[in-house]
Image (cartoon, helix red, strand yellow):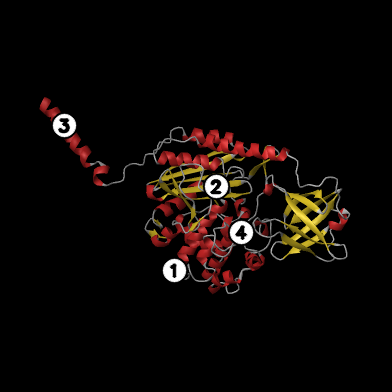
């Protein structure tokens, strides 16, 4: 009897050894400790006043977690699911980078050929940059141009028009000397890619990426987003209250920021990036070009993080690259009115995470807390209380801002008046790059509009007025009105972009706006 029992035990041991995946190099069942994770997400929704979010986690070729939290429509109590579509903002850039890589694979594009090879009329203000700028320069943010976001934000211009207007924008740095993040260069890169392929950028991404990956509901415009059955509304905090806000159409700079997707479909995008550019047996983008996208191309110039867990800050192509707790992380975040997103990949650990949320105040709060917690779990490292750390940092910044606000502005001259009646300031003012600035009188105040962006106007002193808007946060921007030799208000200069001269708008003759109606 004893011999029989021993024999059975021996056989069981042999079977276990023979089927041990560790000994034979087989993939083991994916194990990530997600205990308490859903509760953490729910807690962070409340803590950071986020109405709804979705999270997907990928490990070793599998989607191990995919779920929605909170509401996509608060008023109608419609819950977020893993298939709910959100605007992903600048996470779009990684898709544009990929289609460029695919065009390189097809022999239609060279990363290092001048852009004018493909867009003969391409021109920047700097003549050297105009001649020498390459596709690689566009997508690693070394064109010399700063953001100049107000050129496109709220604008109805086409991409073709925006490309033409690049020549009127002042560079903030010399060509190739620094990394300056700019949406306009990705817009130009996507526009160029479409011209090379003989189709629109949208059609190019659809056919080269969305279709092969089965991203059937992802789309390219908030117009199309609202036609779907399962999409999130945008929310923002205004006057200390979270409210639904209008969708922001960013079609003009679509290659930089316009894709809408769900965590279920973005998980497929992560799997492609972790699987050397393959989906199943299909090679969507070559391993070499995918690796180029994930490789540091330009130091960002940002100071080393105050958090010891991060090692450096670089930009690849459509991806930001850093080290987290000794592990390589390739990621990108996104933010547009009412939405934030973050996609993070651990290439050497074969894992990734996607977080999408319907708030525009959580990009530096909610998303990082969720992403870093997932990374800690994937790496099996002690979980850091990122919420507490970030909250402490934000509280310090807010305290500093409140103290600054209390202090009287030493530069402001009290008891001054504008040199002209308010009606004399009204009219249209034009800048060849930024477009039309319209000044109107609204009762006893002035109001301003740049394209479709509306600004509040308050007298500061003499002929200087302060402009404010939700997109500026607490920052007030000073507009300086100038008179000509006849004493008429002829132009206004405004520091819309840091690091360059004030943007100057010249008055359009015969375009007085008068009273607002």
**In the rendered image, which quarter is residue 57 located in?**
top left
**Of circles 4 and 1, which is in front?**
4
> Is 7 located above or below residue 95 in the figure?
above
Rendered location of residue 263, percent (x, y):
50, 46
**Tag 4: Cα neighbours inside 10 Å, few (<14), some, or many (≥20)?**
many
Quarter of the view holding residue 77 = top right
At label 2, counting other C-alpha atoms closer than 10 Å, the crowd grade (few under 14, some 14-19, many 20 or more) is many
Residue at image position (42%, 62%) is 289
Label 3 – label 4 distance at C-alpha: 73 Å
> Are the residues tagged 1 and 3 within 8 Å (C-beta)?
no
Mark 3 element type: helix
Q: CA distance from mark 3 to mark 2?
A: 55 Å
Give the spatial CA distance, label 4 vs label 1. Answer: 31 Å
Q: Nearer the viewer, residue 80 or 111?
A: 111
Q: Is residue 234 above or below residue 121?
A: above
**Residue bearing the label numbered 1:** 106
Q: Which residue is mark 2?
A: 341
Q: Are marks 4 and 2 in contact (CB under 8 Å)?
A: no
Question: Is tag 1's residue or tag 3's residue first in the polypeptide sequence?
Answer: 3
Looking at marks 3 and 2 on the same chain, the residue that comes earlier in the sequence is marked by 3
Q: Residue furthest top?
A: 1
The residue at which mark 3 appears reads as 8
Q: Nearer the viewer, mark 3 or mark 4?
A: 4
Q: Quadrant of residue 163?
A: bottom right
Residue 237 position, x and y percent, is 66, 40
């Amino acid at each position: 009897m004893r011999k029989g029992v021993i024999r059975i035990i021996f056989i069981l041991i042999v079977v276990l050894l023979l089927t041990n995946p560790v000994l034979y190099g087989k993939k083991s069942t994916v194990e990530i400790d997600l205990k308490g994770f859903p509760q953490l997400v729910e807690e962070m929704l409340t803590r950071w006043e986020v109405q709804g979010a979705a999270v997907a986690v990928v490990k070793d070729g599998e989607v191990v977690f995919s779920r929605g939290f909170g509401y996509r429509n608060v008023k109608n109590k419609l819950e977020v699911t893993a298939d709910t579509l959100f605007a992903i903002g600048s996470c779009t850039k990684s898709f544009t980078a990929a289609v460029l890589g695919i065009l390189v694979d097809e022999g239609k594009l060279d990363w290092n050929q001048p852009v004018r090879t493909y867009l003969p009329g391409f021109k920047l203000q700097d003549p050297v940059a105009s001649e020498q700028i390459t596709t690689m320069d566009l997508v690693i943010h070394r064109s010399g141009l700063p953001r100049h976001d107000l050129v496109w934000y709220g604008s109805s211009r086409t991409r073709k028009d925006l490309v033409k207007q690049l020549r009127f924008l002042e560079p903030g740095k010399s060509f190739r000397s620094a990394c300056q993040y700019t949406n306009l260069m990705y817009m130009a890169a996507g526009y160029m890619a479409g011209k090379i392929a003989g189709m629109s950028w949208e059609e190019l991404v659809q056919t080269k990426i969305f279709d092969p990956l089965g991203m059937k509901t992802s789309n390219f415009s908030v117009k199309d987003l609202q036609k779907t059955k399962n999409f999130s509304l945008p929310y923002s905090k205004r006057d200390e209250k979270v409210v639904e806000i209008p969708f922001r159409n960013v079609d003009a700079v679509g290659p930089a920021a316009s894709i809408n997707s769900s965590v279920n479909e973005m998980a497929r995008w992560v799997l492609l990036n972790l699987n050397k550019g393959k989906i199943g047996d299909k090679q969507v983008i070559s391993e070499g070009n995918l690796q180029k996208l994930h490789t540091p191309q330009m130091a960002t110039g940002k100071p080393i993080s105050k958090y010891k867990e991060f090692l450096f800050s670089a930009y690849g192509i459509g991806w930001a690259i850093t080290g987290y707790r000794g592990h390589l992380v390739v990621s990108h975040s996104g933010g547009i009115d009412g939405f934030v997103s973050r996609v993070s990949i651990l290439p050497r650990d074969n894992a990734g995470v996607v977080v999408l949320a319907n708030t525009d105040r959580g990009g530096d709060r909610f998303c990082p807390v969720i992403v870093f917690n997932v990374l800690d779990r994937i790496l099996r490292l002690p979980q850091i209380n990122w919420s507490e750390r970030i909250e402490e940092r934000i509280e310090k910044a807010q305290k500093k801002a409140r103290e600054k606000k209390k202090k009287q502005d030493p530069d402001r001259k009290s008891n001054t008046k504008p040199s002209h009646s308010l009606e004399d300031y009204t009219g249209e003012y034009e800048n060849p790059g930024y477009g039309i600035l319209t000044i109107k009188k609204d009762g006893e105040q002035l109001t301003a509009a740049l394209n479709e962006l509306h600004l509040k106007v308050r007298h500061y002193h003499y002929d200087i007025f302060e402009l404010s808007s939700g997109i500026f946060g607490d920052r007030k921007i000073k507009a300086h009105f100038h008179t000509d030799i006849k004493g008429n208000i002829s132009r206004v200069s405004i520091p819309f972009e840091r690091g360059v001269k004030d943007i100057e708008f010249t008055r359009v003759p015969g375009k007085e706006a008068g009273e607002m109606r």
